[in-house]
Image: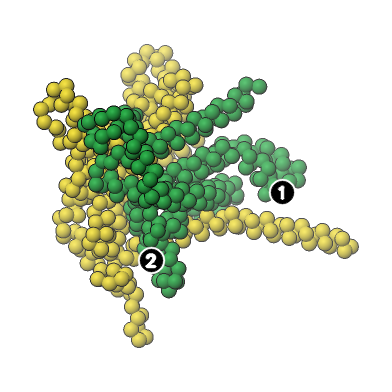
Amino acid sequence: MYIPIFVLVIYSFNKSQFVNVWAGFSLKWYASLFQNDVILTAAWVSIKIAIFSATLSVFIALLAVIATLRFKKFAGRLALKNLVTAPMVVPDLILGMSFLLFFIILESFLFEKVYLRGIPAITLAHTTLAMAYSFIILRGRLATFDTALEEAALDLGARPLTVFLKITLPLILPSLLSSWLLAFSLSLDDVVMASLLSGPGATTLPMVVFSSLRYGLTPEMNALATIIIGLVMVGVTIGAYFMHRKSEGQYGT
Amino acid sequence: MFAQYVSSLFSKIRGISSNYGKILVVAVPFFWVLVLFVVPFVMVFGLSFTQSQFQIPPFQSLFQREGDYFSINFYLGNFRFLFQDPLYLKALINSLKLAGTATVFCLLLGYPVAYAISRTDPAWRLRLLILVILPMWTSYLMRVYAWMYMLNTNGIINNFLLKIGMINQPLPLMDNAFAVCVGLVYCYLPFMVIPIYTSLEKQNPAFLEAASDLGCPPWQSFLKITLPLSFPGIVGGTMLVFIPCIGEFVIPELLGGTHTLMMGKLVWMEFFHARDWPMAATISSLMLGFLLIPLILLQRLQAKVQVRSD
């Protein structure tokens, strides 16, 4: 499973542009990558969208989890659960198209004064998609959550909101973080919805990558891939280190 | 007296505000999915009943007002055209074939992996699982790109085979159904491994011990105990792989060349190249309806399993 990725990394250091020639070690593709304004701008746009949509989606997913798990059964509980998770199984092309239509009609209602297509539309679409994944992760965490601590605090007269902020939130923080990271990477990964919903000035990094891949192989993309893979590795290592330390602290003492 | 009144008022306000808080917690996500998920889909469904035109927007309105008459015009031509033109049927069959093949290979590769992980030392399980999931975190486009590198006519595999003299001419590995299948299996394998692993891990090892105590050979206890018990995981994984594969657009576009037509690509072409939005909406609506059937079946099955385990 890892061979294709390694090949990609190795060839990012190839001096030659061609796959079948190994012309020696070189960093020139990295240099040209960092001089490529299109890619740099797009990367910045992507990161902005990913941060916004990840934060928003984790927040709303958390609300939805609390609503479906902790509150007394109410009408539409099952509907809420199904609707929140539904975007996960809808092909992103169809999801993107329905969003596009929605935003076009919304714009026409606003007399074409407000342009939603572009960064706002992509952010909202990514939030809706990432919400489904965050919901699953957070629900899994809260479903196995020991409610004894919460109950004790409530018995001692703390208000529900205080209990939530002081007890529940710190305990589920790792799950919140991992769902945030998943939402972030989902947003950074999406080509289809972004290209459907993009407007002027809203070209995301995957869109640039996709359009250059359509024309064939470019070593610049290898360099970009290597950077992304490196960042992911660093992130996972840090995450694993903290998880390891935490579990040692829990069981070791 | 007054102090009592004030304190009771405060507690009332507190009660009301916490109630409002609760309503807000339910209302915000509900409102979100309603506005940003349900409404757009209703719009797509509505669009599939309109006629395309060469204007902006490129479709005629569903509603019409002439004087005091208000009418809704359902145009069924898109659906008729869909069933008349063999192109659409071909794309559908092609999608089903490719997604089906990819799902079968994912299952054949994923089940042993999940089984092996669930049988290792618990300390290693998490690490191995992370290794399986890790490629999912690296960019999806880059993974597809990696396979473009491997499968290209002068790519890694062809180069290697030419060098060791196994072939005289590069094999046509790219721009065909084979490449699409490889890409689909590679990208969706983790989605198969994880549900199967979860269902395997949950199993009680006492069953297997009991079977072996009673003289059952391992392969038979696998077939009679492990496999049936992991069925929900298999179904879950199959859905998670098959459904997105049907609508997949990026992989056939990059690896499939011009000849491999799939539903996702067809919708894209109708939308961007032909600018026939109603047609694209019609295909999407039908696809969604088509995908809904296995999903409902899956949920029924899961509910059944839950009842049984309770």
Q: Nearer the viewer, residue B241 or A110?
A: A110
- Residue name at image x 36 percent, y 26 percent: B113
The answer to which quarter of the image holds residue B300 is: top left
Q: Point out residue B52 in the picture as x, y percentages from the top left corner.
A: 25, 68
Q: Nearer the viewer, mark 1 or mark 2?
A: 2
Residue type beneath disc 2: Ile
Residue A62 seen: yes
Which residue, as the protein is rendered here, is positioned at the far bottom?
Answer: B67
The residues tagged by marks 1 and 2 sit, at their Cα atoms, a distance apart of 44 Å
- In the rendered image, which residue does mark 2 sit on? A104
> Which residue occupies 59% across, 46% down?
A70
Q: Quadrant of residue A118 in the image?
A: bottom left
Indicate the chain coloured green by its letter: A
Q: Residue at x 14, y 33 (%)?
A: B171
Q: Earlier in the sequence, mark 1 or mark 2?
A: 2
Is residue A57 visible in the rendered image? The answer is: no
- Residue B145 % position (x, y): 29, 39
The colour scheme of the drawn protein is by chain
Mark 1 residue type:
Arg
Report the side of B16 relative to A72 (left or right): right
* Chain letter of disc 1 in the image: A
In the picture, the disc for residue B202 is none
The local crowd at label 2, few if under 14, some if 14 to 19, many if 20 or more residues have their Cα within 10 Å, is: some
Q: Secondary structure at mark 1?
A: loop
* Residue ID for mark 1: A159
Q: What is the x, y in percent for residue A180? A: 51, 43
In the picture, one chain is yellow; tell me its letter: B
Mark 2 residue element: helix
Residue toward you, A195 or A108: A195
Residue B223 vs B272, above or below: the answer is above
Location of the N terminus of chain B by quadrant is bottom right
